[in-house]
Amino acid sequence: MSFAIIRNTKYKRENLKGIYRHNERRNKNYSNDNIDKEKSYLNYSLKSPKYRYDKEFDMMKERYNLKGQIKTVSNIACEYIITSDKQFFEEIGEEETKRYFETAYNFVAEYKNLGEQYIMSAKVHMDEETPHMHLIFLPVIHTTDKKGNNIDKLACSEFWKEKDSYRQLQDAFYQYMTSYNFELERGVPKEETGREHIDIKKYKEITNFDKTKEKLQNMKLELPDVPEITDININRLSKKRDEKILEEIIKPKDDLINELYKDKLSLHQELLKQAKMIEKAERYQKEREKILADNEKLHKEVDNIKSEYKQKEFDIEWKYKSKIKGLEKENSRLNKIIDKFYETINKFIHWICKKFDMGAEDNLIRDFQEETNTFLDAEKQLKHEEREKEWDLER
């Protein structure tokens, strides 16, 4: 029966850029031979980040007002890799495979009362040999501060503080998935297997890889010639002696040679498997180093772009502020001219009436407006002309 597999990895901030590019398939090329780029369109997200993981982290921390001290060496995010074996997914089919990962997603949101809001990304990869999901989340605990107020605190060490944390995770995941009718066995955590991640260089030293590989290349899988009883001159031997040689010398030697051959064949297969694993790990490490270098380069480029953008933003702002000030100054001058024009018109009307003894100023203004269909008040005149245009259109 297949296993319910869930593995956890902790990440510092410096790791997030490279993880983002791999999980979200942002790289152009991959040294991992298992990735079939022609099938990458089959990948899908149960939750997509809007931004790169490190930026998304900053926004989530601010949005949810997360407490806790964060240092350069702090683990600020975790990644579950959730899967089973290839045969399991082939047997349950496409729809059930999708339900498997959706169910696992819900498990993560509920486990330790985390909350779906603290899942940063959940990407299902269908372009590798076995379907699997990379789920990035923030290890947040719900607790209280010294005053007794409820707070959400980012604390990876507290999230995984129990000595058997991964055993608990395996138990909970297995029980949750089987409760949704997935026929699986419980995965074995590293606490039970005792396995730990070892650096490739160190692993090579421990396994004496280079010498092993050389022996593997020089090893010949040929069964030595086994002497046949017919090779012995039976004319010189009695039948009884012939049988004794066969039973006590030749047959045991024959059995021993065959046994040694089987052991040698088994050793060859084991060494070959080890060699392939090391070579694959080397390719992965080279890809990781390249990703980190590319990310560092991109980070610098982004900083340069930000610097240039800020300078351009300042230049544009200064330019338009200067233009606005100029327009405000010009507008103030025009208002003064208009006010002075109104003042001059009023003085002129008053002078006309007094000079030619024409009576009240109001009568003169009213007669002027009626005979010329023109208002001395500019605003009234503009409104009047607009109404006349509307009337003309209606006709």
Image (cartoon, helix red, strand yellow):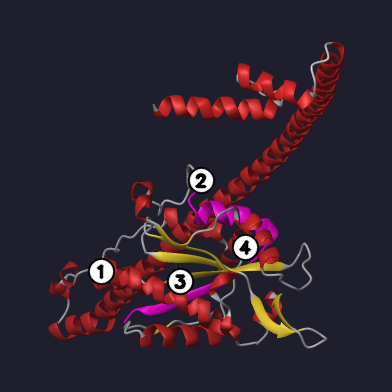
**Residue 308 image position (x, y, % from top left):** 73, 33
Q: CA distance from mark 4 to mark 1?
A: 36 Å
Q: Which residue is mark 3?
A: 82
Which one is earlier in the sequence, the residue at label 4 or at label 1? 1
* Extreme-top residue of the structure: 356
Q: Given the image, on which type of amino acid does mark 3 rest?
A: Ile
Figure quadrant of residue 144: bottom right
Which one is earlier in the sequence, the residue at label 1 or at label 3? 3
Q: Which residue is mark 4?
A: 199
Q: Given the image, on which type of amino acid does mark 1 rest?
A: Gly
Q: Which residues are magenta?
A: 1-25
**Residue 95 image position (x, y, % from top left):** 28, 69
Q: Which residue is mark 2?
A: 27
Residue 53 visible: yes
Question: Is residue 296 depicted above or below 382 in this figure?
Answer: below
Which one is earlier in the sequence, the residue at label 4 or at label 3? 3
Q: Please give the label number shown on residue 93.
A: 1
Whether the magenta-drawn stretch holds residue 370 is answered as no
Q: Given the image, on which type of amino acid does mark 4 rest?
A: Asp
Q: Is the residue under label 2 in contact with that under label 4 (CB below 8 Å)?
A: no
Q: CA distance from mark 4 to mark 2?
A: 24 Å
Q: Which is closer to the viewer, label 4 or label 1?
A: 1
Q: CA distance from mark 2 to mark 1?
A: 29 Å
Question: Is residue 221 depicted above or below 155 in this figure?
Answer: above
The secondary element bearing badge 3 is classed as strand
Residue 261 visible: no
Q: Is the residue under label 3 in contact with that under label 4 (CB below 8 Å)?
A: no
Q: Which is closer to the viewer, label 4 or label 2?
A: 2
Question: Is residue 349 depicted above or below 197 in this figure?
Answer: above
